Image (cartoon, helix red, strand yellow):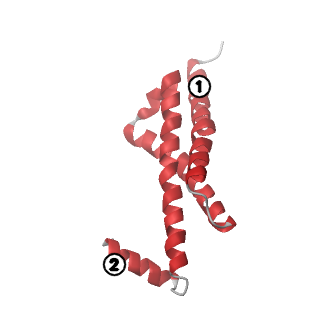
Amino acid sequence: MTEPATTAAGGFALSKLLGLIFGVPLAVAIVMILARPRSTREWAAALISTVVISIGGGAAVVQLYGLHAWAGDYYGQLALASLHFSCGLPAWVVVRAWFVYAERRRDTSLPDMVKEVRDTTGL
């Protein structure tokens, strides 16, 4: 007979894996359909950012709000998958916005663009 702790840890790991398998690719697919990139460089940067933020951002939200108990229930696992999905969407938007901003200021250096953004937003 297996130990309950080992079985619980395996179930938790499986639920996280299912959340990543379903949530992350859906986020990537939706944002790629909604806003198609202009170049391969832009597409790669946005894709990588969306995947990383879907995984890391979703995990951070689970940790922050203590949503670990959701992993033990089928519907909770679906909710966690949609949480990972939702966390990836802003990354695509931010990367695309940066590319549009940088494209309009081709002759400006990166430090000057960062300074302009800071001055504008007050950060």
**21 shown above or below 57:** above
Q: Does residue 52 appear to the left or right of 44 in the view shown?
A: left
**58 shown above or below 37:** above
- Give the quarter of the figure containing the N terminus: top right
- Give the quarter of the figure containing the C terminus: bottom left
* Residue 51 visible in the snapshot: no
Residue 119 picture quarter: bottom left
* Residue 78 visible in the snapshot: yes
**55 shown above or below 113:** above
Identify residue for label 2: 119
Is the residue under label 2 in contact with that under label 1 (CB below 8 Å)?
A: no
Residue 121 picture quarter: bottom left
Could you tell me which residue is drawn at 56 percent across and 56 percent down? 35
Nearer to me, 83 or 16: 83
Q: Secondary structure at mark 2?
A: helix
Number of numbered discs: 2
Could you tell me which residue is drawn at 52 percent across and 42 percent down? 85
Crowd rating for badge 2 (residues with CA inside 10 Å; few <14, some 14–19, many 20+)? few
Q: Which residue reaches farthest left? A: 122
- Residue 30 in picture, x, y percent from top left: 57, 46
- Residue 97 in picture, x, y percent from top left: 49, 66
Kindly report the distance in space between the C-alpha atoms of the residues bearing marks 1 and 2.
48 Å
Identify residue for label 1: 11
Q: Which residue reaches farthest right? A: 40
**62 shown above or below 35:** above
